[in-house]
Image (cartoon, grey):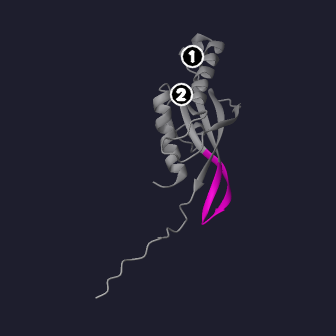
Amino acid sequence: MSNFYALMLTEMKARINEMVPEIVYIDQDFGQLDNENAINLAYPCLLIDFTGTTFNQNGQLSETGDASIQMRIGYKMNDEAAAQGITETALAYYELEGKIYKAFKGWNPANGISQPLNRVSDASEKRTDGIRVRKLLFNTMFEDSTASTNYTTTSPRMTIE
């Protein structure tokens, strides 16, 4: 893989598995939380999307990207959570969100494909379906030179007979 988004998604999934094992479903956000029939969706879940990138040209077909990465954390209110009470459940949700924040604040993948991540914002989604969704937005920068042509600086060896 050489695509930034594919590499980053793979690294982020591994980071969540390592740092926040309470998350039982991690994937790219394809709207699973808005589809009651989403296959394999389990809670709490974390859905990742690259919501926009702006690019500056560096020359030699290289660009610096400034990327926004959105993480949607989905929780489903079940009978057990309701029995604990709304406040206690909300506190547990915020603690889990805090663990996700700590896992990514200042983190950059070991493969060095980006600058450290920084949180830009967080927000709740307004819903009426019994699913609580919190959104975390992070920002990072990366260099993309995959369109660059590789030039060689050496000449082929010449044989004179």
Considering every residue shown, the one lying at the far left of the view is 161
**Residue at (67, 56) in percent of width and height:** 55
Q: Is residue 56 visible?
A: yes
Give above or below for 141 relative to 38: below
Give coordinates of residue 142: x percent, y percent. 60, 50
Give above or below for 134 relative to 81: below
Pointer 1: what residue?
Answer: 81
**Residue at (63, 16) in percent of width and height:** 91
Give the mark toward the camera: 2 or 1. 2
Magenta segment: does it hold 79?
no
The quarter in which the N terminus is drawn is: bottom left
Name which residue type carries label 1: Ala
Pick whichever, 31 or 69, lies toward us.
69
How many labels were placed on the picture?
A: 2
Give the magenta part as a residue range: 50-66
Task: Kindly state the secondary structure of the residue where label 2 is placed.
Answer: loop
Looking at the magenta stretch, what is its main secondary structure? strand
**Residue at (49, 31) in percent of width and height:** 42
Name which residue type carries label 2: Pro
Q: Quadrant of residue 70?
A: top right
Is 153 displayed left or right of 128 in the figure?
left
Binning the other alpha carbons within 10 Å of mark 2 as few (below 14), some (14 to 19) or many (20 upward) gives: some
Q: Earlier in the sequence, mark 2 or mark 1?
A: 2
Pick whichever, 77 or 135, lies toward us.
135
Pointer 2: what residue?
Answer: 44
Q: Is residue 41 visible?
A: no
Pick whichever, 130 or 132, lies toward us.
132
Task: Kindly state the secondary structure of the residue where label 1 is placed.
Answer: helix
Mark 2 and mark 1 in contact? Answer it, CB < 8 Å.
no
Magenta segment: does it hold 56?
yes
Binning the other alpha carbons within 10 Å of mark 1 as few (below 14), some (14 to 19) or many (20 upward) gives: some
